[in-house]
Image: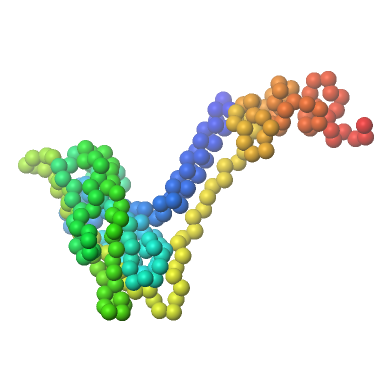
């Protein structure tokens, strides 16, 4: 029973470490439901996934050029490179039930060379997201690239139902790129902490400085309770040993 409980604890720690690692690799991803102008029961049909910190509470997002919390290239080059994606049937709103969709469209206005966000892989009712748009770049306006530039994203999700069963979710998002404040350094991304999983002797997994781990804490069975091989000098008195170093002179 103890062994099973220990393994369960280690699994939970491993999942936590994996989650933190995933956030570090794909930092600051979050969901924005929309402008709140439609029916609350349909808010989860289409949502905007963004990589930004802090995550905006509403449909408007502002990014300063070179801010590592939102500008992907982290460079003061007069361009905000944003990471946005079209997602459907998300489960972050308990007041909205996902449903099979007939259409899911992400229209982009104000970004040169980009008209639509990539479509999600599935519209069958399960949570799904399209790929992040690779060229969502907002270039600052003006000859000196010192004027804010705004883009508008309109997401529309339409269910397969007919008449009264038909559900529609339409949301407008406004994304603005602003010049980096003169005379200041580019902000660094938030610090991401990692979780270290402690080595546990007796869990059946050899790790760290363990010589062995046979899944128990029994001494004298070839792998002792300190996860060293049964022998003279491993600090565990077993078998016919009168002592096991350190045990004084001789």
Judging depth in this view, the residue of 226 and 35 nearest the camera is 226
The answer to whether residue 54 is left or right of residue 106 is: right
The answer to whether residue 197 is left or right of residue 109 is: right
- Residue at image location 90% in from the left, 35% down from the top: 248
Colour theme:
rainbow
Residue at the farthest left position? 163
Q: Position of residue 46 (x, y in %)?
A: 22, 49
Q: How many marks?
A: 0
- Please determine whether, in this image, residue 76 is positioned above or below residue 7: below
- Please determine whether, in this image, residue 40 is positioned above or below residue 225: below
The answer to whether residue 230 is left or right of residue 91 is: right
The answer to which quarter of the image holds residue 91 is top left
Q: Is residue 201 visible?
A: yes
- Please determine whether, in this image, residue 127 is positioned above or below residue 62: above
The answer to which quarter of the image holds residue 175 is bottom left
Judging depth in this view, the residue of 218 and 181 nearest the camera is 181
Q: Quadrant of the C terminus?
A: top right
- Residue at image location 51% in from the left, 36% down from the top: 11
Q: Position of residue 188 (x, y in %)?
A: 46, 65
Q: Position of residue 200 (x, y in %)?
A: 62, 35
Q: Position of residue 59 (x, y in %)?
A: 26, 60
- Residue at image location 37% in from the left, 71% down from the top: 77
- Please determine whether, in this image, residue 108 is positioned above or below residue 25: below
- Residue at image location 29% in from the left, 63% down from the top: 137
């Amino acid at each position: 029973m103890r062994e099973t409980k220990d393994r369960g604890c280690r699994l939970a720690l491993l999942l936590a470490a994996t989650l933190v690692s995933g956030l570090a690799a794909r930092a600051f991803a979050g969901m924005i439901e929309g402008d709140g102008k439609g029916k609350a029961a349909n808010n989860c049909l289409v949502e905007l996934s963004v990589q930004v910190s802090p995550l905006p509470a509403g449909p408007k997002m502002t990014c300063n050029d070179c801010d590592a919390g939102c500008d992907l290239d982290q460079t003061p080059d007069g361009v905000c490179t944003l990471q946005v994606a079209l997602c459907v049937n998300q489960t972050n709103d308990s007041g909205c039930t996902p449903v099979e969709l007939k259409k899911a469209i992400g229209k982009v206005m104000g970004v040169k060379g980009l008209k639509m966000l990539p479509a999600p892989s599935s519209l069958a009712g399960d949570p799904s997201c399209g790929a992040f748009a690779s060229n969502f770049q907002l270039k600052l306006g003006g000859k000196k690239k010192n004027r804010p530039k705004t883009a508008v994203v309109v997401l529309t999700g339409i269910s397969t139902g007919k008449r009264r069963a038909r559900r529609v979710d339409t949301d407008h998002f406004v994304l603005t790129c602003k010049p980096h404040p003169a005379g200041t350094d580019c902000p660094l991304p938030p610090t991401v902490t990692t979780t270290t999983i402690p080595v546990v002797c007796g869990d059946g997994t050899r790790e760290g400085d363990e010589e062995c781990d046979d899944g128990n804490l029994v001494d004298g069975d070839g792998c002792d309770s300190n996860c060293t091989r049964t022998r003279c000098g491993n600090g565990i008195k077993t078998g016919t040993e009168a002592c096991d170093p350190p045990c004084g002179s001789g």
